[in-house]
Image: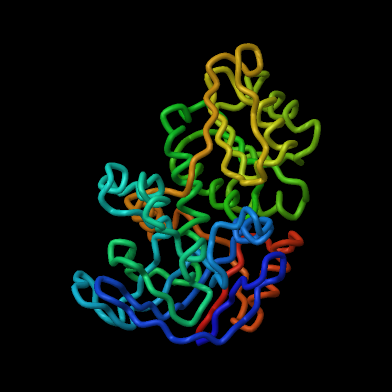
Amino acid sequence: MKALQYRTIGAAPELETVPDPEPGPGQVLLKVSAAGVCHSDIAVMSWPEKDFPYPLPLTLGHEGAGTIEAMGEGVTGFAVGDSVAVYGPWGCGACPPCAGGRENYCLRAGELGIFPPGLGSPGAIAEYMIVDDARHLEPLNGLDPVQTVPLTDAGLTPYHAIKRSLPKLVPGSTAVVIGTGGLGHVAIQLLRALCPAQVIAMDVTEDKLELARSVGAHEAVLSDAAAADKVRELTGGLGATAVFDFVGAAPTTATAAGCVAMEGDITIVGIAGASVPVGFGLLPFEVSVTAPYWGSRGELHEVLDLARAGAVEVHVETFPMEDAPLAYERLHSGKINGRAVILPNG
């Protein structure tokens, strides 16, 4: 089968022919219909050799959806031909967080060598992939796999981040979304669907701000040195109740700190590596700063229910398998407006 692999530290991913996988006991073989492309893949491929934690070659793709081709011994609850999405942050299934469906916070994954698909385990940018356990499959039940596959990360991650702040996002409150690309444009839709807050979007280009407006942002502000002051102006001087930073670079975390309200939340989702100084006098009183990771199995179910209800829709650009390396090039250069999706089987 064809698979897109990261094979050499510092090199671009390559399209390779590799053996077809076969499911072992408890595993599921998926014929991949769609696989998402994510900035975190680019981050992984930028790590130096001394810090690289995964064996190479690595088949990329941690957002996957497809149809069940075969099942290993002991698999129940599914049938060959079922259309499913893959829950990505695999865990041990037995520790307290995993028992509650929060495998994104598994306590033993590192110890046991358990990795997400595309981030250590063979991923979804391939004609077929192995899913380690049927509990990591979510039925699509009529959803289009191409439109839905980004929701397994670009929907689940912002949903998990936003849920924590929903009790504060009451009428009269304000939520700021910094970075309106793959995750951010979904976050705007989720905020509009889940709460009555005013939503202010920020990005560095007008075309990205236009996407933000088209998916429901009340206000769209260029993300520059004046952005925090603009948020305070739009909120009568109070600042934002919740700020969701989907970039995580030094300028955006500074903006988040500069525009958050007293008792507000700053949530750093982006992985650019910057931080927010926390301490008395450094932020408004009782501001909470968090850096969440992905989401739970139950939350993925909820995100797909929102998609079925028409409350969220991902702006996607599709690529055939032979153009998968090009999709990464375009993502790296900032030329994807929304989310890139690879179609491994046409």
Question: Percent position (x, y) of residue 19?
Answer: 47, 86
User: Within the image, what quadrant is residue 78 found in?
Assistant: bottom left
Position of residue 180 in the picture relative to residue 222 (left or right): left
Looking at the rendered structure, the number of numbered marks drawn on it comes to: 0
| Residue 184 shows in the view | yes
Question: Percent position (x, y) of residue 325?
Answer: 67, 75
Residue 33 higher or lower than 212, as above or below = below
**Residue at 29% of width from left, 77% of height from top?**
24
**Residue at 43% of width from left, 76% of height from top?**
129
| Residue 299 shows in the view | no
In this view, the residue in front, 189 or 47, is 47
In this view, the residue in front, 300 or 18, is 18
Looking at this view, name the residue that lies furthest to the front: 50
In this view, the residue in front, 70 or 5, is 5
Question: Percent position (x, y) of residue 82?
Answer: 30, 77
Question: Percent position (x, y) of residue 83?
Answer: 35, 74
**Residue at 43% of width from left, 41% of height from top?**
194
What color scheme is it?
rainbow
**Residue at 81% of width from left, 32% of height from top?**
225
Looking at this view, name the residue that lies furthest to the right: 225
